[in-house]
């Protein structure tokens, strides 16, 4: 089956002499423009003990520039119905802006001000820090909100991928305004920017405006650090996160998985979907439908510049924790025990094909994906050949991928619930370390 229906829009690529990358795609069906900025500055650039510095810096870009106060910036955006948001990831930062066709010059001007001329007002910095710390404290009321962060901090202990992109209560409290200003001066520069623009525009006019606003921007003062690849675990261990009054146990298990540019991405998507990516997945059928232990179970992988986490996640009653974990392990073993078959493969491929177009419905999604394809070095071929790759998969190939990427024996386990009732169960799966959910921060190696 050939992929005749999904073609990624042909963004034209332009590189400014100062290293800034521009991706443009004209689409005149709607009078809208989406601007997506991918900053190649991730949480991996946070100094040890200063987790959250990249995220706080990014979040303050629109909170006052040399030309506008935070209020004036917001009022200007509101006056044209524009939307502006930021999001910090482990490898990069993201800015999104959407405006109407007639306001495209204003949109680019605001982006340039935010990236190049933030003034980081003291009152806005204090407010952000206070909000971020309060957010973590509130999130800890429900282990479901933080279990993934505990899992990453345990699986990647000592590696930058174990950091919280948004910092911790302790690290955020240690940040200073001077460190934010210095972080911006050190790392922000045109060579770190991929700007994708999609929508109702004239490319020549947009490029001329980009030259006017960005061509004299000088590179940052320092190179953004890139960590070494994380290593897979060779034996199982358990982190027990104590919340004495919790009635449920929230749990994750997994190991280091694949990177974004992994050539086996289509097959891995199929395996993840078989195991935990849809209602009829093995995990959902075994845990929810057959055993009645949970309302949901899922599998997902975090694919970054370097291999991220491959994780199974669910929750159940405390008394059923051991049984639920054994069921998860049994379903993982099925990937290795020749229980994959042609009917399962084809059903899953058809399901993925039906879901896939939903990823390309908005200009914002397209511009964002254009940034990702450029940043991770995979290009539009990753999209344009996806259905062909799915069609070429065989059961034998899936079994190879399961052996290479999915753990059979060595797992990182994280259980969050009442430790007093879970210690015996946890010890069954490996050596146990115990911390309290109420403690600030997440897991740190001893």
Image (spheres, rainbow, N blue to C red):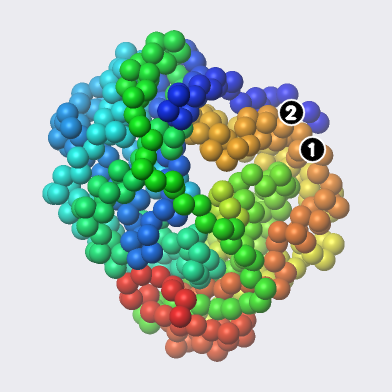
Foreground pick, 330 / 37: 37
Q: Quadrant of residue 442?
A: bottom left
Which residue is drawn at the image coordinates 53% and 66% (left, top)?
Answer: 156
Residue 361 screen position, x and y as percent = 52, 29
Which residue is drawn at the image coordinates 36% and 70% (left, top)?
Answer: 441
Q: Which mark is residue 99?
A: none
Which residue is drawn at the image coordinates 76% and 38% (left, top)?
Answer: 389
Foreground pick, 273 / 27: 27
The answer to whether residue 228 is above or below residue 118 is below
Q: Is residue 87 left or right of residue 227?
A: left
Which residue is drawn at the image coordinates 54% and 38% (left, top)?
Answer: 375
Residue 66 screen position, x and y as percent = 18, 32
- Indicate the secondary structure of the residue bearing disc 1: helix
Q: Quadrant of residue 215?
A: top left
Which is nearer the N-term, disc 2 or disc 1? Answer: 2
Pointers 2 and 1 in contact (C-beta within 8 Å): yes
Q: Which residue is mark 2?
A: 3
Q: Quadrant of residue 48?
A: bottom left
Q: Is residue 360 visible?
A: yes
The answer to whether residue 432 is above or below residue 165 is below
- Indicate the secondary structure of the residue bearing disc 2: loop
Q: Which residue is mark 1?
A: 391
The answer to whether residue 140 is above or below residue 40 is below
Mark 2 to mark 1 CA distance (whole Å) = 9 Å
Quadrant of the frame with the N terminus: top right
Residue 163 screen position, x and y as percent = 43, 62
- Label 2 environment density (alpha carbons within 10 Å; few <14, some 14–19, many ≥20): some
Residue 164 screen position, x and y as percent = 41, 60
């Amino acid at each position: 089956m050939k992929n005749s229906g999904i073609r990624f829009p042909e963004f034209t690529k332009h590189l400014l002499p100062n290293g800034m990358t521009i991706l443009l795609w004209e689409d005149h069906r709607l009078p809208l423009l989406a601007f997506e900025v991918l900053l190649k500055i991730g949480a991996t650039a946070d100094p040890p003990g200063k987790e959250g510095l990249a995220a706080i810096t990014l979040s303050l870009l629109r909170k006052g520039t040399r030309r506008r106060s935070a209020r004036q910036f917001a009022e200007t955006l509101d006056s044209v119905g524009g939307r502006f948001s930021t999001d910090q990831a482990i490898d990069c930062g993201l800015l999104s802006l959407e405006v109407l066709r007639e306001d495209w010059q204003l949109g680019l001007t605001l982006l340039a001000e935010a990236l190049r001329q933030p003034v980081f007002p003291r009152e806005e910095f204090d407010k952000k820090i206070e909000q971020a710390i309060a957010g973590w404290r509130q999130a800890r009321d429900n282990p479901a909100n933080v279990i993934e962060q505990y899992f990453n901090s345990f699986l990647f202990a000592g590696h930058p991928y174990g950091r919280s992109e948004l910092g911790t209560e302790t690290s955020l409290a240690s940040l200073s305004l001077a460190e934010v200003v210095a972080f911006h001066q050190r790392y922000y520069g045109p060579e770190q920017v991929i700007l994708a623009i999609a929508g109702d525009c004239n490319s020549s006019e947009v490029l001329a405006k980009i030259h006017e606003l960005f061509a004299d921007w000088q590179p940052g003062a320092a190179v953004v650090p890139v960590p070494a690849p994380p290593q897979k675990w060779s034996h199982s261990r358990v982190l027990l996160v104590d919340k004495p009054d919790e009635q449920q146990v929230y749990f994750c298990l997994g190991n280091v998985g694949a990177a974004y540019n992994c050539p086996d991405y289509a097959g891995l998507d199929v395996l993840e979907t078989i195991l935990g990516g849809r209602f009829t997945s093995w995990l959902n059928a075994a845990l929810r439908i057959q055993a009645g232990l949970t309302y949901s179970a899922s599998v997902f992988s975090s694919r970054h510049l370097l291999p991220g986490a491959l994780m199974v996640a669910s929750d159940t009653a405390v008394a059923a924790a051991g049984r639920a974990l054994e069921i998860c392990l049994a379903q993982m073993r099925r990937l290795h025990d020749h229980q994959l078959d042609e009917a399962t493969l084809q059903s899953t491929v058809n399901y993925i094909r039906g879901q896939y177009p939903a990823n390309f419905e908005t200009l914002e999604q397209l511009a964002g994906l254009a940034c990702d394809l450029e940043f991770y070095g995979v290009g539009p071929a990753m999209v344009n050949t996806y259905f062909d790759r799915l069609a070429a998969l065989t059961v034998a190939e899936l079994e190879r991928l399961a052996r290479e990427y999915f753990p059979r024996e060595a797992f990182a386990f994280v259980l969050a619930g009442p430790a007093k009732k879970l210690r015996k169960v946890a010890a069954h799966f490996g050596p146990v370390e115990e911390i309290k959910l109420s403690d600030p921060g997440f897991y740190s190696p001893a």
